[in-house]
Amino acid sequence: MSKKKPPRIDAHQHFWRYRSEDYPWIGAGMELLAQDRLPYQFQPLLEAQGLHASIAVQARAGRNETAFLLDLARQDRCIAGVIGWEDMSSPALADQVGQWEHGKLLGFRHQLQDEDDTAGLLTQPAFNAGIAWLQQQRYVYDVLAHERQLPAVRRFCARHDRHWLVLDHLGKPALKEFRKSKAAFARWRGELRELAAMPHLTCKISGLVTEADWLRGLSPMDYEHIVWCLDAALEAFGPQRLMFGSDWPVCLLAASYARVTTVVGQWAQQRLSPSEQDALWGGTAAACYGIAA
């Protein structure tokens, strides 16, 4: 009897009903994002690439974001799970998480990248107590940070090894700097290797096209640099701790959904065995987040 293949999952995308006050990070040049982005727009793209489901990830702070995404997930079988938002420092965290009572709630995230003092937040006792409680409850925490914040992220991840942590967007390498100096690539790769040394950390191959200079338009060199990043991630994490995520609709600023999946797909076919590709395209996400086949 042949072994059942894991579901093919886009492990990182977003939905929203757009209001400018809710999404201050959508700024000049991002008009493409300043509109509703909902499942009926996304599902045809997902299916056209042979993917079965996705994980919807929070894109704004606030419990109403979690409620919104879970409401979509209740209505849509293609949403395999939700990464919501909660105040990790709240003394009422357990009660607040308990109010959701939804099997598709897989974990939580906060936009650490936008904090003025990311290192300070990551060392706060209340915040760390919240993360420790989440891990005891078997919730995953997604870590969203820029490359320059990775030293603080590394120390934070080392403190929390009781359940999976997920590094979003490969730690957001500064692709804009790669064309100026190979030292920029080497610096990020060094940080990534130190993070990957922790076996409870997995990594999303996501968000790279918008770390390049997308306002200028992506060049063949930019795509070459993306392949450098994919190779570095494979070297650091190995094939079983990587998962594909599109970062739709944010990716549309730089490339179509089909282009994003094709770049990763062509790279994977050249580097990975069939079983390793299965892990990248859903097996790792299913195992990490506890998604039933």
Image (spheres, helix red, strand yellow):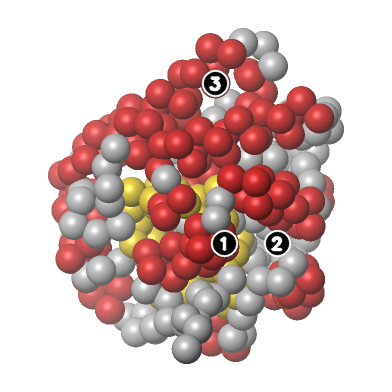
Q: Specify which label sits upstream in the sequence, 2 or 1.
A: 2
* Label 2 – label 3 distance at C-alpha: 35 Å
Type of the residue with mark 3: Phe
Q: Secondary structure at mark 1?
A: helix
Q: Residue 124: give x, y in percent of width and height.
A: 21, 41
Name the mark nearer the viewer: 2 or 1: 1
Tell me: residue 254, above or below residue 81. above
Residue 240, picture quadrant: bottom left
Q: Who is closer to the viewer here, 188 or 151?
A: 188
Crowding around mark 1 (Cα neighbors within 10 Å: few <14, some 14 to 19, many 20+) is few
Q: Specify which label sits upstream in the sequence, 3 or 1.
A: 3
* Label 3 – label 1 distance at C-alpha: 29 Å
The structure residue drawn at horizontal position 20% and vertical position 51%, both measured from the top left corner, is 161
Q: Residue 37: give x, y in percent of width and height.
A: 72, 65
Q: Residue 135: give x, y in percent of width and height.
A: 22, 62
Badge number at residue 185 = 3
The structure residue drawn at horizontal position 65% and vertical position 46%, both measured from the top left corner, is 270
Asked if labels 1 and 2 touch by Cβ distance under 8 angstroms, the answer is: no
Q: Which residue is mark 1?
A: 274
Tell me: residue 140, above or below residue 168. below
Tell me: residue 17, above or below residue 192. below
Residue 44, picture quadrant: bottom right
Query: In this orientation, does residue 89 appear?
Result: no
Badge number at residue 190 = none
Q: Who is closer to the viewer here, 59 or 270?
A: 270
The structure residue drawn at horizontal position 34% and vertical position 62%, both measured from the top left corner, is 140
Left or right of 269? Residue 200 is left
Q: Residue 178: give x, y in percent of width and height.
A: 63, 19
Name the mark nearer the viewer: 2 or 3: 3
Q: Which residue is mark 2?
A: 18
Q: Secondary structure at mark 3?
A: helix
